[in-house]
Image: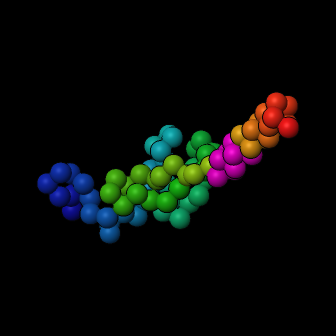
Amino acid sequence: MPNRQGQVPPSSYDSKKCPYCENHLAVEDRFCFACNKRVGKLNKKTGMAEHPVAAASYIICLLSWASFIFYLWWAFFR
């Protein structure tokens, strides 16, 4: 039953919504069948799937900055 704010209590969610296209998915789904994007865990407050963290992007960014700093050191300070 919804509470006064119109939200369903967290224990009664049997599906989650894709944060990109808002299709209903099973709680254990990792990919949305409609938009083919990766979805995260269920946010128990809203019933929406969380945006997954793109760890590979962060690693590539850190490696790029490290390479750039190494190049600056090699080109100007050695």
Residue 21 lies, with reference to residue 27, above or below; the image says above
Q: Residue at x 55, y 52 (%)?
A: 52
| Residue 71 visible in the snapshot | no
Tell whether 35 sits left or right of 67: left
Q: Residue at x 81, y 35 (%)?
A: 77
Residue at the top extreme, as displayed:
76
Q: Residue at x 56, y 60 (%)?
A: 29
Query: Where's the N terminus, which quadrant?
Result: bottom left
Residue 18 lies, with reference to residue 3, above or below; the image says above
Residue at the bottom extreme, as displayed:
11
Residue 35 point in image, percent of width and height? 59, 41
Is residue 58 one of those drawn in magenta? Answer: yes
Residue 44 point in image, percent of width and height? 36, 61
User: What is the count of numbered marks?
Assistant: 0
Query: Where's the C terminus, which quadrant?
Result: top right
| Residue 58 visible in the snapshot | yes
Q: Which is more toward the observer, 71 or 23? A: 71
Tell whether 44 sits left or right of 71: left
Q: Which residues are magenta?
A: 55-64
Q: Could you tell me what secondary structure mostly forms the magenta stretch?
A: helix
Residue 62 point in image, percent of width and height? 69, 46
Q: Residue at x 62, y 49 (%)?
A: 54
Residue 9 point in image, percent of width and height? 26, 63
Quarter of the view holding residue 2: bottom left
